[in-house]
Image: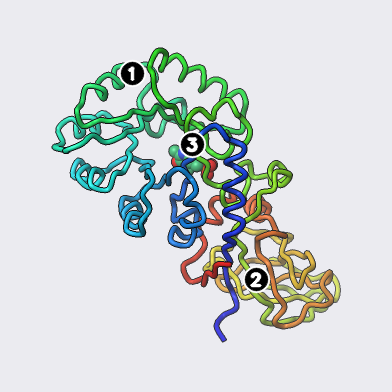
């Protein structure tokens, strides 16, 4: 028998989450964001369930080509744009839409020999200071793009640095409105948080990512559970050993847990080499044989220990949920000083994945 750890991807949940977002932004078209290998879920595993979206947004050209090879014909958006002028031939051949965030990309577009124009997303820097043109330059850049025969439809886009904050979104939207005054074009601003919480950011295209996977962008599932979103990924394993501690026994590396009473504990085949956070402190939630309990001591590379006091039914071979429908990935993440996004993306390649 193979090591009992497993990630389960729930396709029905993906489809349901997509349809909920569609209803929330019912007047907009929707890019399903599948960067970082679909937030760790696997592009090849999820793309069919999400193909009712109006297009896919991702980073790597080879991922875009994979989707084309599979027969996906709707738009594909490259969220970091192209990386070299030579890429433009491929973008053209496979009908990929690109973000343009820097002047060198505009020069490359002007010089390229393309037999038909490419659609582009003009990226505006509205405060994040990663990619994009300053708001004061948008009008000039817009006109440069319009003049090039290699440029087709231009959509204005920006990305919020604090989409959970009304004030931040309002400030960014005011800057954008000033920068784009009089330009007649489609606009795309909203990530998951803005799609959920700021309907006035929806415009023509929304770009939800994390919410499609059933996880709240705010780190707080109570914000979304009432809307019916379902976690797509379950990380599960089994109890592979049971220890009975007497008062004073210590557990794991550095002995950073010490029992103050007689205590039954379970050892689970899951550790940081599987993608579980090493920083998870004693007390991080875990479900064992249908009952909630928590980790104790340090997370090792391949194993972790849990308290079985609240799970008297637990045996060797009992099923464990590390995150999923019962244990929120955001709770595991926040206790470990990180975010749900990172845990999903960091699922290790050694964990077998099944789709249901
Ligand atoms: C990642 C990303 C998104 C999606 O963000 P979520 O918070 O996962 O919804 C949208 N737009 C851009 C430009 C991104 O990089």
For the residue pair 286 and 301, the one nearer the viewer reads as 286
Residue identifier under label 3 = 29
Task: Look at the image and tell me in which quarter the C terminus lies.
Answer: bottom right
304, above or below 158, in the image: below
Of pointers 3 and 2, the one earlier in the residue sequence: 3
The secondary structure type at the circle numbered 3 is strand
Q: Residue at x 49, y 40 (%)?
A: 30
The secondary structure type at the circle numbered 2 is strand
Residue identifier under label 2 = 304
Q: Residue at x 77, y 65 (%)?
A: 293
Q: Residue at x 35, y 56 (%)?
A: 71
Numbered mark located on residue 137 in the image: 1
Residue 61: x, y in percent?
A: 31, 50
Residue 328: x, y in percent?
A: 68, 55
Label 2 crowding class (10 Å Cα cut-off): few <14, some 14-19, many 20+?
Answer: many
The secondary structure type at the circle numbered 1 is helix
Of pointers 1 and 3, the one earlier in the residue sequence: 3
Query: Assess mark 1: CB under 8 A from ligand 1?
Result: no
For the residue pair 1 and 77, the one nearer the viewer reads as 77
Q: CA distance from mark 1 to mark 3?
A: 27 Å
């Amino acid at each position: 028998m193979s090591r009992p750890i497993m990630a389960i991807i729930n396709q029905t949940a993906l489809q349901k989450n997509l349809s909920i977002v569609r209803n929330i932004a019912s007047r907009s078209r929707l890019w399903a964001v599948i960067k970082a290998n679909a937030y760790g879920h696997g592009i090849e595993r999820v793309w069919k369930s999400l193909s009712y979206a109006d297009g896919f947004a991702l980073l790597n050209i080879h991922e875009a080509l994979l989707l084309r090879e599979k027969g996906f014909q709707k738009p594909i958006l490259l969220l970091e744009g192209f990386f070299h002028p030579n890429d433009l031939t491929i973008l053209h051949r496979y009908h990929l839409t690109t973000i343009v965030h820097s002047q060198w990309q505009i020069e490359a577009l002007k010089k390229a020999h393309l037999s038909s124009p490419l659609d582009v997303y003009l990226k505006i820097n509205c405060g994040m200071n990663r990619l994009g043109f300053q708001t004061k330059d948008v009008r000039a850049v817009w006109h440069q793009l319009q003049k090039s025969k290699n440029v087709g439809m231009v959509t204005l886009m920006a990305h919020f640095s604090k989409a959970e904050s009304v004030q931040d979104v309002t400030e960014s939207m005011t800057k954008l409105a000033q920068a784009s005054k009089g330009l007649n074009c489609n606009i795309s601003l909203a990530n998951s948080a803005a799609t959920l919480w700021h309907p006035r950011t929806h415009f023509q295209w929304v770009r939800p990512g994390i919410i499609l996977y059933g996880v709240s962008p705010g780190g707080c599932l109570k914000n979304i559970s009432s809307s019916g979103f379902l976690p797509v990924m379950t990380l599960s394993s089994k109890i592979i050993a049971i220890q009975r501690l007497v008062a004073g026994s210590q557990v794991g590396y550095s002995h950073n847990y010490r029992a103050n009473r007689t205590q039954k504990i379970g050892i689970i085949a899951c550790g940081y080499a599987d993608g579980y956070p090493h920083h998870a402190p004693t007390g991080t939630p875990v479900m064992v044989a249908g009952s909630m309990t928590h980790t104790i001591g340090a997370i090792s590379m391949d194993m972790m220990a849990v308290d079985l006091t609240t799970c008297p039914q637990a045996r060797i071979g009992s099923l464990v949920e590390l995150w999923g429908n019962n244990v929120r990935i955001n709770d595991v993440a926040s206790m470990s000083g990180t975010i749900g996004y990172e845990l999903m993306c960091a699922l290790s390649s050694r964990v077998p994945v099944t789709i249901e």
